[in-house]
Structures are given as structure tokens and as C-alpha cells.
Amino acid sequence: MTIKDIAELCGVSVSTVSRVLNNHPDVSAANRERVMAVVQSSHYVPNNSARDLVKPQSDTIGLVVRGAGNPFFTGIIPVIEQAIHQAGYTMVLHQIRPGEDELRAGAELARSKRLRGLILLGGRFDYTKDQVALLGIPFVCCTYTNSFGTLKDTAYSSVTIDDRASAHWAVKQLLAAGHRKIAVLLDSVCDHSISQLRYLGYQRALEEAGIPCDRELVEEAHSFDMPVAYESTLRLLARRDDFTALFVISDSMAVAAMKALHDHGKRVPEDCSVVAIDGIDMSAYVIPTLSTLVQPQRALGENAVAILVDILEGRSGSRHLLLKTSLRQGESIRVMK
């Protein structure tokens, strides 16, 4: 039973039922008694979604995080929350697993919470016009953009790094150090997502150096999880252990890969250099410190909120920002002699 059903049974408006449920004083004793009798007989339990049906448009911005537990996102979520509050809005957070549909989750959240706007932290890179029509409110893609989809730029906004260029830069660090046999650990070479973009950057760097891409040095984990990355690195080493460097598409996967290299008897960086992308806190505390391209987490979060608020308050339309990474020179790259 819904709040609307109660209103029909009592012969009153939905707003009257809402005022009764929220214990507002401006309800007649007769109506209050009638509503509560139906509530008790039907065992109705009030919930936020039902109460929100009678509210005007809220001042709430939703944040849907795809990949609950992703250590890279943990540094961005509080930044987004603080920026939303400073802009005079409230935030509601909803986390989903990596394989779940962030657009459907966002659409359900938008309806139940009557959201003004939405930030999607992590998501697919291949949206279509029909898919985003489910949302019905302005939204910003944070940490990714619609690289493989068919959306027009005016249909959405985004804040991200250039994943292909960053991967190209990371591999060039290894090439500049004299490495020629460079392996790569990634999710997938054709996932229409971040992994594919970073693989394309890896390929471009090798091509520019005149080095053929050896598919035996390409290891697809089909996951970003650290245990899977660890096992995938061991699988790569069992197949080929003559590479002198490894490019990993994320810091957390790189930390797992360094453990696998150690357990296989390879020292980092003496026997195998490692470079990655992200710049999460954890990777600064491994031994040796991971060399990585750092994503500007604060700028990603703050710009996502600023763009969305500008849209909501009529100051601008859709915008797309590409932010730069910066090299954190750790101790995981050895210069070849």
C-alpha cells in the first residue's frame, strides 16, 4: 500500500496523509483519526520515498558511485559532498557494484528523492540518447566521459582526465628509462571503458618507439580487484617473465602486481619496473613507492559540482573538462644501463 492508496481510502488528499504521517498540527482531529485507522489496519510503514511524493522539487543532488569500495573514489566522495553543501544543496549518496547499471540506479534515485541533479562517479563510456533519457535531470559524469557512445556533447557534462594521453605518458616514462620489453596489466583491451582507452595509450607509446605490441605481454584481468590482479600477474609471469617493465592501468592493481612479482622472485625495480595511473594514498606507502600519474581528485570532484550547480541555477549549459595528471616519481622505475 502507498500513501496515495491511503488517501483514496480515507477520502482525503495525499498532502493531508503526509501531514498526518509527519505529525503536523494543521490537520483536523477527524481526518487524523481516519488516516491513522487506515495506517494501523493496513500495517503501513512510512518511508522517505512516500513522503517525498508530496514535496516540491528538492534541493538535493544525488551521487551514484559505481564500484563501491574503489579506493580511488574514497578520496573524491568527501570532496563532492563538501562542495555540494557549500553551494547550498544537500547530497544523497547511493553506491552500486561495478557491474550494475548506474543510469537505472540514478533514475530510481531521482524519482524517489526528487533530485535537482545527479553526479555519476564512475560509469560506462558508451551511453545512448535513449538510455540517458531515463534520468530526466541534469547530470555530470565524474572521472569518465562518453568516449564510445553516441551522445551529443550538449546532452550531458563530464569531468575527467585524458586516459589515453595519461597512459601514453606513463609508458613513455618506462621507454625513457631504456625499457623495451614492457608488459601491461589491464581489465580488458576492448571494454569500451577506461581500460581500453589506457590500452590505446600503451599501444601508441610503443608504436612511436618503433616497438611492436606483443600480445603475449598483454594480460587481461577482467577485473580491477586486487586479488584478481595478483593472480593475473602470476599468470603473465608463467607465460612470459622476460619483460623488464610493467604498466598497470590502476594503482590498486599495481600494488597487487608488485606483490605477485615479489612472490615470483622478481625485485621491483631491479628486475622489473612498474608504473601506474591514479595516485591513491595506498600506493605511496608500498615499498618501493609506486611511480604513478596522479589524478587531481579534488579538482575532479569540485569541478563536477560546479558544473552541475551552474546548470541548475541557469548560469551555463553542458560543459566538458579534461584535467591533467601529474607524475609522482616514486622508486619503482629502474634506468636501464
Image (cartoon, rainbow, N blue to C red):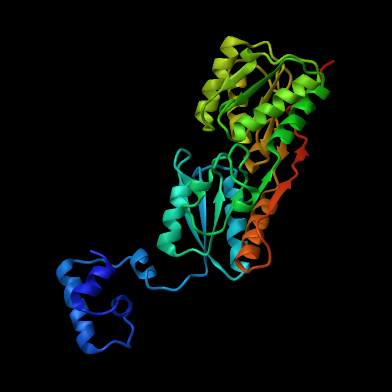
Residue 325 coordinates in the image, percent (x, y): 74, 42
Residue 64 coordinates in the image, percent (x, y): 50, 52
Q: Quadrant of the C terminus?
A: top right
Q: Is residue 57 left or right of residue 45?
A: right
Of 82 and 167, nearer the camera is 167
Q: Is residue 211 left or right of residue 151?
A: right
Q: Is residue 129 visible?
A: yes
Of 27 and 85, nearer the camera is 27
Of 43 and 69, nearer the camera is 43
Vertical placement of residue 263 versus 117, above or below: above
Q: Residue at x 52, y 22 (%)?
A: 231
Vertical placement of residue 325 versus 225, above or below: below
Residue 12 coordinates in the image, percent (x, y): 25, 80
Q: Quadrant of residue 309?
A: bottom right
Q: Is residue 331 visible?
A: no
Of 267 and 237, nearer the camera is 237
Vertical placement of residue 99 versus 275, above or below: below
Going by the picture, which residue comes out furthest to the left?
41
Q: How many marks?
A: 0
Q: Residue at x 80, y 16 (%)?
A: 210
Q: Residue at x 76, y 38 (%)?
A: 328
Residue 280 coordinates in the image, percent (x, y): 64, 42
